[in-house]
Image (cartoon, rainbow, N blue to C red):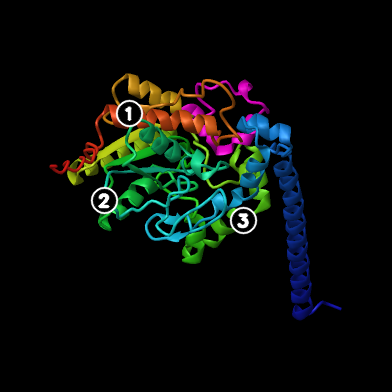
Amino acid sequence: MRPTRSNLFGRVFSTVAVTLLSAVIFIAAAEYGAGLILKQLRDKRPLFTVPDTDDNIRKLFDTDSPARYREIVSEAWRQADTVYSPFVEFRMPPYQSRHFNIVEDGYRLNGASPGDLRAAGPKVFVFGGSTTLGFGVGDDETIPAYVEQALKAAGRSDVQVFNFGVFSYYSTQERIALDRLLTAGIKPDVAVFVDGINDFYYCTIPDVSAWTERLAQLAQVRARVPILIELSRRSNLVHLARHLGGDKAVIVREWGSFCTGEGDVAKVAHRLDTNRRIIDATAERIGFKALFVQQPVPTYAYDNRKRPFPVQEEMLGYHMNSARGYPLMAQQRSQGQLWERGLLWLAELEPAEGNAYIDPIHYSPRLNKAIGDKIAQAILAEGHLPPPPPPPTAPPTPSP
């Protein structure tokens, strides 16, 4: 008996259905297996985890008061907390605690004094990322706090210093943050920009930030991405293949990006230098001074064997970009290709004694002080501040 057309169609349909179901099960199993492999690889990535014993804290912070720094470290996650802000994408939210205080205007206190952006008198604004904000140290141990202390020690107690450091900021966001203050009618006498490490961390042109991905998802920009591209971005199999092909970014899973070649490194150096030129032009037109600090990094001119605890290259993640970026900028500087006006090159700076880094990249109080002292010296040496007010005159002695 010859099979009918309906029976033939049923067999073909069954074969296709079984094949598709088998493919789906196979792909799902492969995705699950690739996910487990990636998880193991990511879990094996070395992290800087030092037990918070008194002895370890003494070594990291050069302190005789480990309990104080244990309190600071316990709320360090607050120093990475950000909220949405127009144009710059995010900013520090107000927060109050014993050692970490952010006011409504977005700056961190330097100690007990709250400061006043709108008060008369000379002002210094300091912009930067988490190293400027002072990750892992108290209010009075940040770079801006030490700038203020050094200025007061030099007789300039009339100067207010404001810490506008924000976790993950780099030169583009800092330039925009300055613009927003200027358009609001708030102008400094000196604007200081502490940069280098985060610019190379975000080795991406055009610029992106730590919030770009989440904002794109909220705005449903990804809905316009072709479905196959979107699936490949989410596929564990694709990520595992990329890792096996040498893509380090798969395991790092941070906000930044690796520079894929010397061309990328050169573009980031150009971005940082161009932002400095734009800021300096703005300062000249608006009427204030700009100071640009090439900050120290542990990947350039620093012997990491000095650390009390070892740091492997894998712990530095995307910060390893600066290991190529800083030598390039040093070469460009020697050849006169970098913007030099207001440039304070501190790439080789480290404290005269004691520890320099409390984790893979954040500064110890000793290094913060060394940087703050250098900035204060440059501000005073260049005459960036208006002259101090004259001392009060004694009232005339009444005639007998």
Asked if the residue under mark 2 is in contact with the one under mark 1, i.e. CB atoms within 8 Å, the reply is no
Q: Quadrant of the C terminus?
A: top left
Look at label 1 and name its amino acid: Ala
Does the magenta-highlighted stretch encompass residue 69? Answer: no
Q: Which residue is mark 3?
A: 234
| Mark 3 → mark 2, Cα distance in angstroms | 54 Å
Residue at (74% x, 37% y) in the render:
53
Look at label 2 and name its amino acid: Ala
Q: Which residue is mark 2?
A: 120
Residue at (28% x, 26% y) in the render:
381
Residue in the foreground of this view, choosing between 116 and 307: 116
**Label 3: which secondary element:** helix
Left or right position of 36 against 140: right
Q: Name the front one of labels 1 and 3.
A: 1
Left or right position of 291 against 93: left
**Residue 30 horizontal/vertical position (percent):** 75, 53
Look at label 3 and name its amino acid: Arg
**Residue 271 picture quarter:** top left
Q: Please rate how many residues cluster around mark 2, counting C-alpha atoms within 10 Å: few if below 14, some from 14 to 19, many from 20.
A: few
Q: Which residue is mark 1?
A: 378
